[in-house]
Amino acid sequence: MNADQMINTIQHIALVGNPNCGKTSLFNQLTGARQKVANYAGVTVERKEGFLTLASGRHVRILDLPGAYSLDATSPDEAVTRAVCLGELAGEALPDLLVCVIDATNLRLHLRFALEIRRLGRPMVIALNMMDDARRRGIQIDVAKLSHALGVPVIETVAVKRHGAADLLKAFENQIPRAPLIAEDAEQNDIHAQVRALLAETVVMPRTTDQRDDALDAVLLHPVFGLAILATLMFFVFQAVFTWAAPFMDGIGYTVAAVSDWTTSFLADGMLKSLLKDGIFAGLGTVLTFLPQILILFFFILMLEESGYLPRAAFLLDRLMFGAGLTGRAFIPLLSSFACAIPGIMATRSISDPRDRLTTIMVAPLMTCSARLPVYALLISAFIPVKTVWGLFNLQGLVLFALYFGGIISALLVALVMKRFRRDQSDHALLMELPSYRLPSWRSVGIGLYERATIFIKRVGGIILSLIVILWFLAYFPQPPAGATLPPIDYSFAGQIGHVIAPIFAPIGFTWEICIALIPGLAAREVVVAALGTVYALSGNEDAVSHQLGSLIAGQWSLPTALSLLAWFIFAPQCLATMATVRRETGSWKYVGIMALYLFSLAYGASLITYHVAEALL
C-alpha cells in the first residue's frame, strides 16, 4: 500500500451514520463530558464536538455529525454532513478519519449509507454498533469477511457499555487505510444489490425482526392501548415534576435565602446592598429554585429517547397529527420544543416537505418550553393547594399537565387552521425507522442532564443576570423625592413604565408589577420570575427572595389574575432568540411577523376570557 493511502496521525475524527444507529451514544462514550455544542458558521445546523486523549497521550478532536440516510442531501442536516465529509464546509477542516456507525441489527438499511461513505475514498472505519443486541437475537456476522468485502476495518462496538468502544480506541492508534476507490460500473452503482450480496455472504439472521420488539410493539403501538399508555406516561411525568422536585426546590430556596442574608449582613444600607439583595439574590435565586423541575422533566425525555420509544410515539400520533395538517415526523421537533423552541424549530430540518416543515415551525412555540416551567411552578405553588385528588394524584401536577396539554391542543388547532389556508392539499405518508428497544444508557442520560444543567446555569449567569441588573437599575433610579409616601419603585423608571402600559393589560387582570416583568421576559421567559422577585423586593417586601415570592404574590394577587397569567403563558409571544431562529430557518421576516401577531392575539384573548370567567365564577 502506498504511503499516500495511509494516514499516520489521526487528529480529527468525524462520526457519521443513519439516525438511531447509536452514534451519539458512541460519541458520549468516547468523549464523556469533554464536549461542547455550537452551530456551524453561516448555518443553523448544530455542531457537537468533543475531545479524546488516547493511551499514547495524543489528543483527538471528535465531531458528531448530524444523522443522515444518504449523501444525496434532502435536508440541511444531510447537506452539512455531506459538506464536512467532502471538506467543502467553510471553517471546518476535512476529517482525518471517518467513522461510519451502523446498527448491527439493521444492516440492510445502514450498510447502504456505509457504502456511500466508502465511495469517497477517505480513511474510514466502520463501527459495527449494538453487537450485544445482535448476539441476543441470534444474528451471526462474519466481521472479518465483511471487512474484507468492504476493504475497510470493521470493529465491533457496544456504545452503551463502559468498555464497549475499547477496540475502536485501539484502532485510532494505528494507521488507517483509505477506503478503496470502486470502479463505477452498473452493478457497483446499484447499492441495493451490493447490500443484498454483502448480507448473503457475511450475515446469518434467524428472523428479520426482533421477537421482543414485536411483542412490545403489539401493545405499545396498539391504536387504543398504545395511546392510553402514552397519555399515562406523560401524565406520570408531570406528576413527578412537582412531587419529586419539591424537597430539592426547598433546599435551594433556603440556601439562596441564607446566602443572601449572610452576604448582605456585612453591608450598610445603600446601592450595593440593594443590588445584591433585591437584584441578584431576589432575581437569580428565584430562577435557580426551579432547576430540579427542569432536570426531572429532561430525565424522562432522555430515558424515553434512549429506550427507543420516542420514534414509536411519533408513529402512534401520526394519524392524530395528520388530521391536523402535521405529520408524525413533526413529533420529535415538537417534543424538542418542550426543552426550548429553538432546537425544536431547528429539528424541523428532518422534515423534507416544505409546507409540513413551515407548519411545524409556526406551531413549535406553542409547546411548553422549559423556560415557562418556572412561571408555571411559581403560580401553581402559590395558588393551587397541595392536596391529593381521587386518593392518588397531586392536584398541582394535574394543573401542570393541563397547561402542557393545553399547549399541545392549541398547536394542533393552529396547524388545522393553517391546513385550511394552504394551497397544496396533497397528503404525504410517514416513513420512518423504528429502532430496537434498549435499556437506557445511564452514561448518556447523565451527560444529557449535565449538559442541560450547564446550559441553564450559564443562561442564569449570562443573559438573565444582565437583564436583572438592568431591571434593578430601572427599578432603583431615580430615588423617591422628599416626603414620598409610596414605595420607592413607584417613582423609578420601571415604575413609571409599568404604570404607563398597565391600562393595556388591565382588562386581563395584570397588575403594573406584572407588566414590568413581561418586558424583560421578551428576552428570556425565566426572567419573568426573576423580575417579579426584584420588583417586589424593591417595593419594600422582604419576602421577595427565592421561595418566599410565592406566598407574597398569593397574598396580593387575585386568583383570576393568576389564572389569567397562566393562560397568557400558554400562548405568549416567544423570546427574541426564538424569533431570530424562525427568521434564519424560513429566510423571511414575514413569518416572524405572522407568528408574533397570532401568538400575541391568542395570549391576550385567552387571558381575557380566563380572567372574566374566573371573576364571574369565583
Image: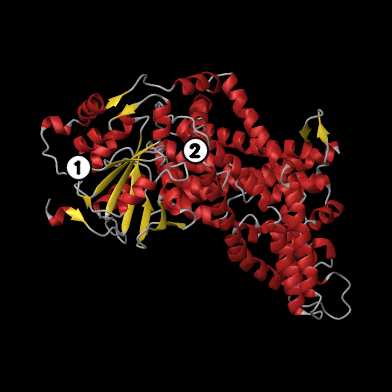
Three-letter residue code for mark 1: Arg
Residue at mark 1: 119
Question: Looking at the rendering, in which quadrant would you find the C terminus?
Answer: top right
Image point 78% across, 36% down: which residue? 395
Most foreground residue, 299 or 388: 299
Three-letter residue code for mark 2: Ile
Image point 73% across, 78% down: which residue? 272
| Residue 361, visible in the rendered structure | yes
Q: Is residue 83 above or below residue 264?
A: above
Residue at mark 2: 332
Image point 52% across, 52% down: which residue? 578
Most foreground residue, 173 or 72: 173
**Direction from residue 330 to residue 229 in the image, left or right:** right
Q: How many marks?
A: 2
- The image's colouring method is secondary structure
**Direction from residue 294 to residue 128 in the image, left or right:** left
Q: Secondary structure at mark 1?
A: loop
Most foreground residue, 326 or 414: 326
Place of residue 126 in the rendered image (x, y in percent of width and height, measured from the top left): 29, 42
Q: Are marks 1 and 2 in contact (CB under 8 Å)?
A: no
Image point 42% across, 49% down: which residue? 27
